[in-house]
Image: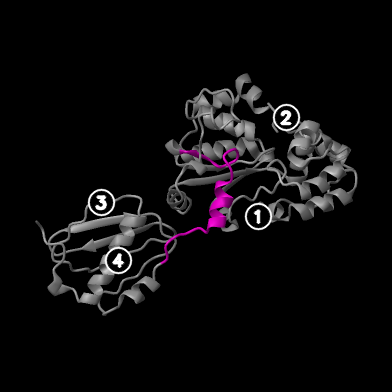
């Protein structure tokens, strides 16, 4: 059996530190490899930027490579000085999420982000933001043929809430996983929510224990009765969005091609499906054409101010323009939404 360390070459304090560093790499890395080190003599440690770290340990007889992709920041080990364990640990940073952050990311069984293992994609979808389109598309690129796309028990899609917390943390901080979100301008989205859910007396009574007669009443109700159909689209800690692909309703075609190209799923078969009647039928299952009705419901600035305040995070994080609709020219400029 090979000797794991040559004690004569490594002072005891450094030895303890190295053991801890190796343990951290194995515990938090994405790959685990057997380690066999003879006559340990560390001569170099290199770190890449961002979240990917490649650490090389050189020995006098063989070279052992350990690669981890789950660190937020680097770990520095100085083998020329005698460090104690506390000093080494104080210089490392392991990615972590609080219980509240994990809960925010995972959400509930019915609206958790979709995970596509084949393409290493975590997709943050939002109700009333083209979710029918995205669910049917993510089914198609995985070869799933389930009709009830909105029922997570039968639609065949995989959701982030199904994963262990440690795996969620690893995936969220790992740059090899693509994180994407698709959002809609808040004024158009909440109007779509009102037309689809607010005017549905059965839905409102079950979820909010009251009904509404006007759009203004619905906005007041939305402040008091939380529901995924009209809550904020910011559903992860804000710092994650700096490295996410962000798609918006007005650019859905361009974003779809960009996202699928990035993950390696864009091809002629997908393009044909997107142009098919089957795709259109599925993506319009809850369409309300709210974009065509903005002039009818936003005929003054007062209601727009209410929404600017209600969805401040959406406007800030996703950089939507917080300007009033120009209704003098709106009839000619309105963007007709093809999905809801």
- Is 105 magenta? The answer is yes
| Along the viewing direction, whichever of 254 and 316 lies nearer the viewer | 316
**Which type of secondary structure does the marked residue at label 3 adopt?**
loop
Crowd tier of the residue under label 2, counting other residues whose Cα lies within 10 Å: few below 14, some 14–19, many 20 or above: some
Residue 204 place in picture, x, y as percent: 78, 37
Residue at mark 2 to residue at mark 4: CA–CA distance: 55 Å
* Nearest to N terminus: mark 1 or mark 3: 3
Residue 122 place in picture, x, y as percent: 51, 43
Query: What residue is disc 1 on?
Result: 317
* Nearest to N terminus: mark 2 or mark 4: 4
Residue 62: which quarter of the image? bottom left
Total labels drawn:
4
* Nearest to N terminus: mark 3 or mark 4: 4
Evaluate if marks 2 and 4 touch, with contact meaning CB atoms under 8 Å apart. no
Q: Nearer the viewer, mark 3 or mark 4?
A: 4
Residue 13 to residue 243: above or below: below
Residue at mark 2 to residue at mark 1: CA–CA distance: 26 Å
């Amino acid at each position: 059996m090979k000797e794991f360390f040559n004690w004569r070459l490594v002072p005891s304090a450094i030895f303890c530190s190295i053991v801890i560093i190796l343990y951290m790499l194995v515990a938090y890395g994405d790959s685990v490899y057997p380690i066999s080190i003879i006559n340990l003599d560390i001569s170099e440690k290199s770190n890449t930027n961002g979240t990917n770290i490649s650490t090389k340990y050189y020995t006098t007889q063989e070279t052992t490579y350990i690669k981890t992709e789950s660190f937020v920041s680097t770990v520095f080990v100085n083998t020329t000085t005698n460090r104690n364990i506390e000093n080494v640990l104080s210089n490392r940073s392991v990615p972590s999420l609080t219980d509240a952050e994990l809960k925010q990311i995972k959400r509930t069984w019915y609206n958790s982000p979709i995970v596509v293992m084949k393409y290493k994609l975590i997709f943050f979808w939002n109700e009333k933001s083209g979710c029918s389109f995205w669910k049917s598309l993510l089914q198609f690129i995985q070869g799933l043929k389930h009709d009830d796309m909105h029922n997570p028990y039968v639609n065949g899609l995989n959701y982030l809430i199904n994963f262990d917390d440690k795996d969620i943390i690893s995936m969220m901080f790992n740059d090899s996983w693509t994180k994407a979100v698709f959002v809609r301008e808040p004024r158009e989205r909440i109007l779509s929510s009102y037309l689809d859910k607010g005017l549905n007396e059965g839905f409102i009574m079950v979820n909010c224990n009251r009904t509404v007669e006007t759009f203004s009443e619905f906005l007041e109700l939305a402040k008091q009765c939380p529901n995924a159909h009209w809550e904020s689209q910011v559903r992860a800690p804000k710092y994650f969005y700096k490295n996410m692909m962000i798609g918006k309703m007005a650019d859905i075609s361009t974003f779809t091609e960009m996202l699928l190209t990035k993950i390696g799923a864009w091809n002629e078969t997908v393009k044909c499906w997107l142009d098919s009647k089957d795709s259109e039928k599925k993506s319009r299952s809850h369409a309300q054409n709210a974009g065509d009705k903005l002039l009818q419901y936003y005929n003054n600035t007062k209601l727009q101010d209410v929404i600017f305040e209600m969805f401040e995070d959406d406007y800030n994080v996703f950089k939507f323009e917080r300007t009033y609709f120009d209704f003098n020219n709106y009839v000619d400029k309105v963007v007709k939404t093809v999905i809801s």
